[in-house]
Amino acid sequence: MPEFTLTALVPWVITHGYFILFFATLVEGPLVTIAAGVASGLGYYNIVIIILIAIAGDLTADIIYYLIGYHSRSLIIERFGHYIGITKERMEKVGGMVHEHFGKTMLAVKLSPFIAIPGLIAVAASHPSLKKYIKISLLITTPKSILLALLGFYSGQAYIYLADTITDGLYAAGALTLVIVVIYVAYRKIFSRVAKNFA
């Protein structure tokens, strides 16, 4: 995969199929979902399938983090967790939050761009039930995936409109890049703020 920027991902997404997109969402779900939404807006993919792939990829990644956290707390997390930001103190804090406010903890962790992976592993290390974990994860993942895919989709539609109304294709491409960057920055800020409110 090329450098992880949204503008680089859009052409990459366009040249690959649905199957590869699923695996890409496991690595960088939000960026890939927005980029795939842009590709859908440009007519390359079906937006409903993109949304379903985004949800499936996000949920699959969450289950992987659950299995890591749940089954390897003593072996991996307590011995090597500090390398990825999971300390014993954080584990105890997350454990208390998980048992008292499971839904709010999951929401804060999943919407925080920088702590999602270690946070989900730490949540799973507190041994919640898999059924409850999947249910809450799905409730958070579904609207988030729909929102990101639609943001990308309407960015692609905006590009088509701009390309039809602006004769110079370079200006249209620049405008699309600007719209995509603004959307992604807004996404990071909004979800970071929501996560802080629930932390």
Image (cartoon, rainbow, N blue to C red):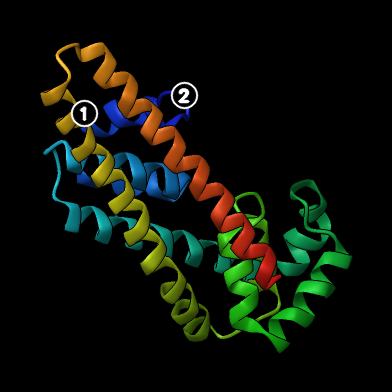
Q: Can residue 37 be seen here?
A: no
Q: Secondary structure at mark 1?
A: helix
Q: Which residue is mark 1?
A: 15
- The N terminus appears in which quarter of the rendering? top left
The residue lying toward the viewer, choosing from 29 and 79, is 29
Q: Which residue is painted at 56% across and 63% down in the image?
A: 110
In the picture, measured across the screen, residue 24 lies left or right of residue 97, that is left
The residue lying toward the viewer, choosing from 158 and 129, is 158
Mark number displayed over residue 110: none
Crowding at dot 1, Cα within 10 Å, few <14 / some 14-19 / many 20+, comes out as few
* Among numbered discs 1 and 2, the one appearing first in the sequence: 2
Three-letter code, disc 2: Glu
Three-letter code, disc 1: Thr
- The C terminus appears in which quarter of the rendering? bottom right
> Residue 132 at x, y = what percent?
51, 85
> Residue 95 at x, y = what percent?
76, 78
Q: Which residue is mark 2?
A: 3
